[in-house]
Image: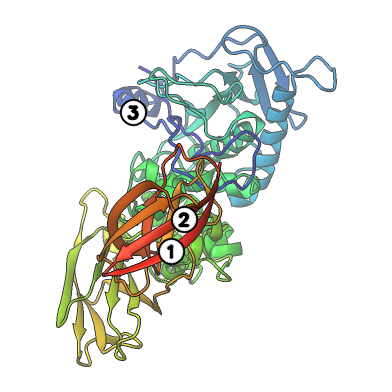
Amino acid sequence: MTARLAVLSGSFLLWATLHLPASDATHSGRCGTLAVSEVQRVQELEAGIQSDRPRPVLPLYLDAPSGWFRVHYAITGPDAVPDADDDGDGIPDYVQEAIIALDRSWNIQQQYQAPPQPLSDGMAGGSPALDIYLRDLSMAGPAGAGYYGITIPDSLVSSGVGRWPRFTTWLEVDNDFAPGDTNVYGDTVFGTTGVAGLRITCAHELHHVAQLAQFGTANVQLMLYEQMATYMELICYPEYDDWRIYATKFFRDPAAYALGDASAFAGYVWGWFPRVYGASDVQVYAGVFSAMQQGERPFTAMVQATAAIGHPLDSTFTRLLPLLFYTGDRAGDTTTTAGPPTPELLPTLSWHRAEIAQAPAVLSSGELRPFEVRALQFTIPTTDGAEPVSTSVLLSWTNLEAYQSTEFPSRRGYQLVLQRSPDERFQPIAGTSWGVRIEPADVTMWIDNAATVRPAQPYPLPVALQTDPTVYVPVPGALPGDPVVVHLRTAAMGMIYEHRGTVQYDRDRIVAQVPLPSVLVPGVYLLTADCNGTTVLHKIVVQR
């Protein structure tokens, strides 16, 4: 068994392509961390026993002009790097790109508490420089799921202060980030491929190098380690939206991924979060490094660091809630540097629960983990009998003590009450005779209410079968939950397809959601929607 802290970049996009719509594409390559099976070896390193983990044997190397890095590589065999050599100097372009990415990333990260130069991993790689080995990692890891990169503790750093063991390290990074690489299960490993994958992995891994050298591994609350390293991808290479695939998982199921989760995966999901502090993110990181050097646990270090700059984590997160709501189709002109980057490219925040309010009251209850976001939607009749109001409620429990105590997980029960003719304990909902109240008082509640919309025409137009074979059809006068029958017809009114469903919300729009047959040929079609004794006719255009 060997000691290793395997850390790799979050989530990724396509080959050298920027700003693509976020998706739920699953890629197996993620993070390997201090595995339980390796604890004994870690303890030996803590005792000062040098690691006997064999380093890869690669025949060639290239030194960085800075002298900080030595990149080891091969041009034949399973670890061979791409053979492109545009400048004809005999050194593969991929290796030179690795050197450039390493130097660039380290220079940028110095302001985020990286030391002036990486701590030397000794002469095991042939020089005092930090060694990086370009290897095929598509089937790496105990289960063969694949890694983007691995940061491996090499020897204990005995000098200095601190509670957590600190290490010199060496790195392994994938040799090509090929789009077709699969793991032992046949799953695609890399979401960001080629040089783009190389660059963000260098940024990510080098921050782990700084973490292990500066404050060490607490082996708890690994979320913060991965959050910081994923944020470094965004800082060093903002042109790549790799963080967005993991963030997408949160916006499509916000209750599943709390900022207070201690797992490393949560760090990928919330990798963009330090951005909410703007230019103060440097101060936050400095505070985290300092607190952990003094022996504080990761989440406690974050609490102290954010309080020290006058923007405590709890109040900052509360201010963030509406910015989480205004993503996707809701983004509009609400884009701000205080929220997630490119909010218009993220999914619209999904509902944990959506229902129609029935007089005299509606009760919704549940339990919240620390810094979990729960999104609820209620349809409430208006006082004048016109279109109902769609009221969106975001809840969170921003309890700092529970956030820090991940070994003893806490949950906060809540009751959300919507009531007609409310008393002064309720917050009024504009345009209605209803109000809303949350119990207990330490649960944060943010409310957005807006009149629902009835579109005049189906959307999107044209309908693209290959990317989103769904058309949303207006149903005048209907309410969510009403049964609807939609017929797809030829331009001559010949029957093609029948869909039976219910009227529902698409965000704040009242529509019938109709999946189209994948075998449709491009062209012009008619739709008839029958609901509550009324039939409406629409025309749509379908394309591949």
Q: In the image, 263: left or right of 236?
A: left
Label 3 to label 2, Cα distance in Å?
58 Å
Label 3 element class: loop
Label 2 element class: strand
Q: In the image, 21: left or right of 480?
A: right
The numbered disc on residue 50 is none
Q: Are marks 1 and 2 in contact (CB under 8 Å)?
A: yes
| Residue 454 vertical placement versus 473 (above, below) | below
Using the image as rendered, state which of residue 510 and residue 217 is in the foreground.
510
Q: How many marks?
A: 3
Tell me which numbered mark, 1 or 2, is placed earlier along the sequence: 2
The numbered disc on residue 35 is 3
Q: Mark 1 is on which residue type?
A: Leu
Q: Quadrant of the C terminus?
A: top right
Q: Mark 2 is on which residue type?
A: Leu
Q: In the image, 88: left or right of 541?
A: right
Q: Are marks 3 and 2 in contact (CB under 8 Å)?
A: no
Q: Residues within 10 Å of mark 2 (few under 14, many from 20)?
A: some
Residue 532, x across and y down, in percent: 26, 69
Which residue lies at the image location 52% right of the left edge and 63% below the top edge? 339
Which residue lies at the image location 70% right of the left edge and 40% below the top edge? 104
Q: Can residue 327 be spotted in the picture?
A: no
Q: Residues within 10 Å of mark 1 (few under 14, many from 20)?
A: some
Task: Identify the residue position indicated by label 2 in the image.
Answer: 526
Residue 63, x across and y down, in percent: 73, 23
Using the image as rendered, state which of residue 195 and residue 491 is in the foreground.
491
Task: Identify the residue position indicated by label 1 in the image.
Answer: 537
Label 3 to label 1, Cα distance in Å?
61 Å
Label 1 to label 2, Cα distance in Å?
7 Å
